[in-house]
Image: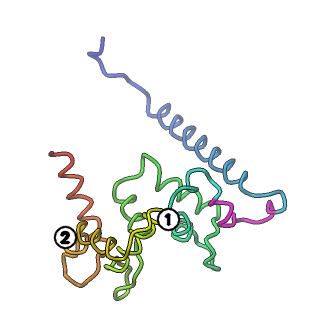
Amino acid sequence: MGTTASQLGKDLLSEYQISSQESVHNKAHKRFSELLSKEDRNFTSVPMEKVLSLPELKANPFRKRICHVFSTSDMKDGSLTFEDFLDLLSAFSDSATLEIKSHYAFCIFSNTIVGNSWGVCIHGCLALVNCLTEDTRLTPEEMRQLISNVNLQIKSDIDKDGTVNLSEFQHVIEVTRFHQIVL
């Protein structure tokens, strides 16, 4: 018992994977369709306000930013097509890679443009802390002290340009993850 490897045929395994993907796709489509009202069924996207009604996003302080990051709408209104919705579900799924998760986290936290790319600057850190502590009502001095204690800018800004770019952000995540595994 347990000494021989299970031989699951490639055809059967492939069929199972396709069936599993179709099941996930169907569940996602059902959830997406539930967000559309009967009047909206002719449209191809769900308005941001409806997406924000999802229980998974209601309490998230970055819910609007999440919609804008995943939205491909030309109107920049945060509405999501079914493909956008699938991208959102995929990025937040347990099976998403650390690279994908960190990429979208960076996009959600980014707030300034440096050259031709987005980055996080000290003012952005203050905005993030403000968003996360909006119910706590920190004074400006308490907020500055919190940012100073976190020290994200100094530790993460490898090229010392005043912002944290995607590669620096991903580096900090990898180093933090490494320390959590080792310690």
Disc 2 element: helix
Q: Quadrant of the C terminus?
A: top left
Query: Residue 8, located in which quarter of the rendered image?
Result: top left
Disc sitting over residue 155 in the figure: 2
- Give percent across and percent down for residue 176: 22, 56
Estimate how packed mark 2 is, as few (under 14), some (14 to 19) or many (20 or more) residues with alpha carbons within 10 Å: few
Residue sitting at 29 percent across and 17 percent down? 4
Disc 1 element: loop
Q: Amino acid at mark 2?
A: Lys
Residue where numbered disc 1 is placed: 62
Left or right, 154 with respect to 1, comes to left
Whether label 2 touches label 1, CB < 8 Å: no
Q: Give 60 or 140, whichever is nearer the viewer.
A: 140
Q: Amino acid at mark 1?
A: Phe
- Give percent across and percent down for residue 41: 80, 60
Q: Does residue 86 sit above or below 12 in this rendering?
A: below
- Give percent across and percent down for residue 127: 41, 74
